[in-house]
Image (cartoon, rainbow, N blue to C red):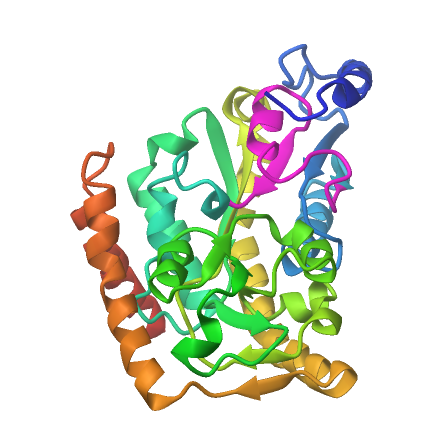
């Protein structure tokens, strides 16, 4: 059930009316091939975040390539739907397209959670190419009923905290925001992982609910978190986060063929736009955090690094064990991810 669903009923009615006015059927389809189409697109993070920047680029590109036939209304920063509500919001017709993070709900998205297994992917582009290829190749049932508009990931996760973490003693007992495969890693490190979306992290830091978080480093600038932390530990964990944008399959199928062709063309292009832009933004975020807020980059002590390496190496086996009864061959999926990652890293 959607949170605060009463907020969306009025909006849904307005959308339904708008679809009729623009020539769409009651099912969200198109009554005439050349009539205008307005699509709504929702995401939980701020407009400055790199996934939201990708949304704006997608909106511009689809408008341009359809000669203005398709226009897109963007709802970012959780103004329409919050993280965890977005995929259901697409199904229920609250929004036409929604982008959310499957890493926040590994129980619902077990196939996608393979991307959080640390196998040494050293860039968002390598990880994103691998993720989209896996989704296209396996067509996992966790996305049944949806058309995947695009998918991509961040870089690896790094500890970003109020006090420096360089040893086992430093991290023990520390309350840290984490998601996906990083949760058991922190538990083994004797930290106290707490689940929440990135949109909630700033307030949690400022109110003392958490003492830091594990995430990719662009959030220091995109979410303004650099002002609330003092240290980044220079040790990469698994891929920080993944994002998938979806449209209800029935609504997608009812679009004109020319529009569906453009959407298909943009799937890989937007993955590359987002991931390459993300990789380029990391150093800018680090410089911003250091220069504007005095954030320090600290190294892990050798003894701690050796133990952390061992813990990460065990995550692959644990993921296979955890997903042994899932609807897919966990061992086969992990092996295929390794193959694709090697191919993509060599590009």
Q: Quadrant of the N terminus?
A: top right
Q: Looking at the picture, does residue 147 appear above or below residue 103?
A: above
Q: Quadrant of residue 99?
A: top right
Foreground pick, 237 / 166: 166
Is 80 colored magenta in this rendering?
A: yes
Who's the residue at 33% across and 62% down the image? 188
Q: Is residue 274 left or right of residue 309?
A: right
Foreground pick, 347 / 36: 347
Measured from the top left, where is residue 129 in percent x and y? Answer: 41, 59
Q: Quadrant of residue 216?
A: bottom right
Q: Looking at the picture, does residue 80 appear above or below residue 292?
A: above
Measured from the top left, where is residue 154 in percent x and y? Answer: 51, 62
Is 89 colored magenta in this rendering?
A: yes
- Count of picture labels: 0
Foreground pick, 20 / 192: 192
Find the magenta span and give its range: 75-101
Q: Is residue 163 left or right of residue 338?
A: right
Q: Is residue 320 left or right of residue 208?
A: left
Measured from the top left, where is residue 167 in percent x and y? Answer: 42, 81
Q: Quadrant of the C terminus?
A: bottom left
Who's the residue at 27% across and 57% down the image? 337
Measured from the top left, where is residue 45 in percent x and y? Answer: 69, 50
The single residue placed furthest to the top in the displayed view is 26
Q: Looking at the picture, does residue 73 appear above or below residue 347?
A: above
Q: Is residue 315 left or right of residue 160?
A: left
């Amino acid at each position: 059930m959607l949170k605060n669903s009463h907020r969306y009923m009025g909006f849904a009615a307005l959308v339904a009316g708008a679809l009729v006015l623009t020539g769409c059927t009651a099912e969200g389809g198109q009554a005439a091939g050349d009539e205008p189409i307005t699509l709504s697109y929702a995401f939980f993070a701020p407009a400055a975040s790199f996934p939201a920047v990708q949304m704006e680029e997608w909106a511009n590109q689809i408008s341009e390539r359809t000669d203005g036939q398709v226009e897109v209304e963007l709802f970012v920063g959780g103004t329409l739907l919050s993280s965890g509500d977005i995929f259901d919001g697409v199904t229920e017709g609250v929004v036409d397209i929604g982008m959310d993070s499957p890493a926040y709900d590994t129980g619902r998205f077990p196939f996608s959670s393979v991307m959080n297994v640390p196998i040494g992917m050293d860039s968002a582009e390598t990880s994103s190419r691998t993720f989209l290829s896996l989704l296209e190749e396996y067509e996992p049932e966790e996305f049944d009923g949806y058309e995947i508009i695009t998918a991509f990931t961040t870089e690896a996760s790094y500890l970003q905290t109020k006090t420096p973490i360089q040893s086992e003693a430093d991290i023990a007992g520390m309350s840290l925001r984490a998601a996906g495969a990083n949760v058991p890693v922190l538990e083994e490190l004797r930290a106290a992982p707490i689940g929440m979306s990135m949109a909630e992290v700033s307030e949690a830091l400022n109110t003392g609910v958490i003492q830091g978080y594990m995430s990719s480093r662009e959030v220091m600038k995109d979410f303004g978190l650099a002002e609330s932390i003092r240290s980044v530990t220079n040790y990469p964990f698994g891929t920080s986060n993944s994002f998938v944008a979806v449209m209800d399959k029935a609504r997608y199928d009812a679009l004109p063929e020319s529009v569906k062709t453009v959407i298909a063309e943009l799937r890989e292009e937007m993955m590359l736009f987002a991931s390459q832009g993300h990789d380029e933004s990391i150093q800018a975020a680090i410089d911003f955090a250091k220069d504007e807020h005095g954030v320090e980059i600290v190294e892990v002590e050798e003894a701690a690094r050796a133990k952390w390496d061992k813990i990460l190496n065990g995550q692959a086996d644990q993921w296979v064990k955890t997903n042994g009864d899932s609807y897919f061959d966990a061992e086969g999926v992990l092996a295929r991810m390794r193959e694709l990652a090697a191919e993509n890293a060599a590009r």
